[in-house]
Amino acid sequence: MAIPYVRQLDFAYGRCDQVSPLIRRVICNNPGPFTYLGTGTYIVGRGEVAVIDPGPDDPAHLQAILGALEGERVSAIVITHHHSDHSPLAGPLKAATGAPILGCAVARHEADDSGVRMEAGHDLAFKPDVSLCGGGEVKGPGWTLEAIPTPGHTSNHLCYALPEENACFTGDHIMGWSTTVITPPDGDMSDYLESLRRIRARGFATLWPTHGPPVRDVEAFIDAYLEHRQERIDQILGALKAGPATIAELTPRLYADVDPKLWPAASRSMLAAMIHLVREGLLEADRDVGPNATYRLA
């Protein structure tokens, strides 16, 4: 099943667009391989509002958000996770509005020493005023945001349901334009697959990712996301039927149709899958599970 990506979006940087009765969006001018068109900051409600994922520490984007909020009160600054294209502007926005920052702090920062850059980077200073790691709600006039723990992309990732529109703000957990990066040690494939099923079971009508357009055909999209992950897992298991191998040996075989420049990133994704498969009892490793281990069918 091919993933039915959605990539077309009518927008202008810094412009505030009303995208649903309760939701406005301002897109930061930070396009790139990890951010697609840029970070989409969402404003929920009217008069008293919540701001979701204010984005990178970009003064122009801060001014665009404040311009969109003129005459309104921000009661909550809500963060999906601590990557540097999502959370750093929370501090300056708090200073400008007095609103508390809500989200989930990382239990501990674990460095990825692979040298492979697969994300925009971590906001190591991120620390919410109010913790939603176990879930919770924040409310305003006519709107409710419910925090849904969705670890996987990062250990502290949260999605936020908006029940008044049967919608969900998905951060980087589900993106319409691309698959989601899962890279150890902070990313975890087992957690990610469980979190995908958790969101699918909610029956949302619309998903609002931080990057790119909304996803409207939600169940089919998540099913395709899950199938894509399963296909990659099946490829690994199939390849190891020929005998034990390392990730470095498997990557050129399984990604032969991919630009070799992308093989280091592919190997990090494969490591996430290997950790999951060892945990599930389907693979064994000759040493601690990691990039240099030799893997074989259990």
Image (cartoon, rainbow, N blue to C red):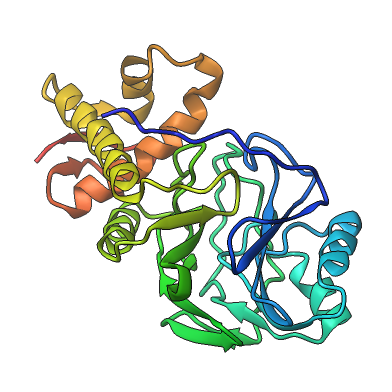
Horizontal side, residue 163 vs residue 245: left or right: right
Q: How many marks?
A: 0
The residue sitting at 56% across, 44% down in the picture is 213
Q: Which quarter of the figure has residue 42?
A: bottom right
Residue drawn at x 20%, y 48% is 278
Q: Residue 2 placed where, x, y %?
A: 32, 28
**Image position, residue 240 (x, y; %):** 17, 26
Q: Residue at x 38, y 19 (%)?
A: 255
251 or 99, which is in the foreground? Answer: 99
Can the viewer see residue 161?
A: no
Quarter of the picture holding the N terminus = top left
Judge whether 106 appears above or below 205 on screen: below
Q: Which residue is at the front of the view, 164 or 228?
A: 164
- Outermost residue to the front: 21
Residue 109: % across, % down: 57, 65
- Please name whichever residue, 211 or 33, is drawn nearer the observer in this view of the structure: 211
Residue 24 appears at what percent x and percent y?
67, 62
Point 82% across, 65% down: residue: 68
Q: Tell me the quadrant of the picture where the C terminus can be found.
A: top left
Residue 42 visible: yes
* 19 and 42: which is toward the camera: 19
Left or right of residue 124: residue 257: left
* Horizontal side of residue 165 vs 39, given as left or right: left
Does residue 263 sit above or below 53 in this rendering?
A: above
Q: Does 58 appear above or below 166?
A: above
